[in-house]
Image: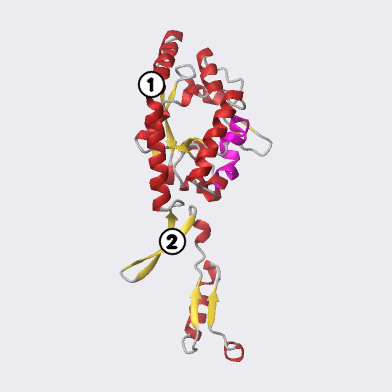
């Protein structure tokens, strides 16, 4: 066929199980004046996209190539730092008042630290104002349920563990203010998929892990299109839309939409 049709290029795209067949094809094509291209069957394993780099003349497939270019990452980080530092003076005043309210309501720490999964699957301590009773983590099993598809639901708008001050903070999203410190530490961004709980990530399908290809954020596409009305781990499509369509303009649009959503108090609990 190559000789009759005067083919110039041959592209081989076969699954991994056809490794021996690929070897035979390449060997057969050695004596023919054609270029041979092989598409490796590994791209479905990539976190977002795959890049090819060379090491000692050997091509290597980077399955965790970043979704953002170096320029995009620098721009996003610069935007985060400038806006966060601008908001800090007012935010620190508000956080001081909130800390006093939590302390007056009852015993327990003011700041709640929780392990979350960040960009590329890295674990970090995410900060929030405590909105639940002191031993809330030990009572998690009392509110967890499963839906009709067997998916875990870990949040409820009638969670008995939430304190009175906590309900106000959650309704206004003020409980998220300490995450400005996570941004300054480089662990989070203003906009991006929400950092997920490790035990929920363990239940992820491989395709859902693509949401960790960018810095995780305080707010994002998911929040302004449903917020807590839609459990995060069951609506990864919203996060993947953000990953695939990232731009600084999109970040700015999401921040403005977030303000409107918070003012309406929609979906927060």
Q: Position of residue 50 (x, y in %)?
A: 46, 59
Q: In the visual, does 206 lie left or right of 118? A: right
Residue 184 belongs to magenta span: no
* Dot 2 crowding, Cα within 10 Å, few <14, some 14–19, many 20+: some
Residue 236 belongs to magenta span: yes
Q: Secondary structure at mark 1?
A: helix
Q: Do residues under tags 2 and 1 come within 8 Å of each other at their CB atoms?
A: no
User: Which quadrant is home to the N terminus?
Assistant: bottom right
Q: Position of residue 97 (x, y in %)?
A: 42, 14
Q: Is residue 193 visible to the viewer in this orientation of the structure?
A: no
Location of mark 1 (residue): 92
Q: Position of residue 159 (x, y in %)?
A: 58, 20
Q: Position of residue 19 (x, y in %)?
A: 50, 72
Location of mark 2 (residue): 51
In-front residue for pair 145/247: 247
Q: Residue at x 57, y 38 (%)?
A: 222
Residue stretch in magenta: 223-240
Q: Is residue 139 visible to the viewer in this orientation of the structure?
A: yes
Give the residue furthest to the right.
148
In-front residue for pair 69/171: 69
């Amino acid at each position: 066929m190559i000789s009759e049709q005067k083919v110039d290029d041959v592209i081989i795209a076969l699954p991994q199980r056809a490794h021996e067949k690929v070897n035979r094809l390449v060997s057969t094509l050695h004596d023919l004046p054609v270029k041979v291209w092989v598409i490796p069957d590994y791209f479905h394993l990539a976190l977002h996209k795959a890049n090819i780099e060379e090491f000692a003349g050997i091509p290597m497939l980077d399955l965790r190539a970043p979704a953002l270019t170096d320029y995009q990452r620098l721009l996003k980080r610069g935007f985060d730092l400038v806006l966060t530092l601008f908001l800090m003076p007012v935010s620190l005043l508000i956080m001081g008042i909130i800390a006093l309210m939590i302390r007056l309501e009852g015993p327990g720490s003011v700041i709640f630290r929780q392990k979350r999964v960040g960009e590329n699957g890295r674990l970090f301590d995410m900060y929030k104002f405590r909105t639940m009773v002191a031993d809330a983590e030990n009572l998690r099993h009392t509110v967890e349920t499963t839906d009709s598809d067997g998916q875990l639901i870990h949040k409820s708008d009638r969670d008995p563990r939430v304190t009175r001050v906590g309900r106000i903070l959650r309704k206004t999203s003020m409980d998220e203010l300490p995450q400005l410190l996570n941004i300054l530490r480089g662990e989070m961004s203003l906009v991006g998929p929400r950092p997920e709980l490790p035990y929920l990530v363990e239940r992820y399908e491989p395709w859902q892990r693509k949401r960790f290809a960018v810095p995780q954020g305080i707010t994002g596409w998911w929040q302004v299109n449903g917020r807590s009305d839609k459990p995060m781990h069951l609506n990864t499509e919203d996060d993947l839309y953000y990953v695939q369509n990232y731009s600084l303009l999109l970040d700015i649009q999401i921040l403005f939409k977030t303000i409107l959503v918070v003012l309406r108090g929609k979906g927060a609990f």
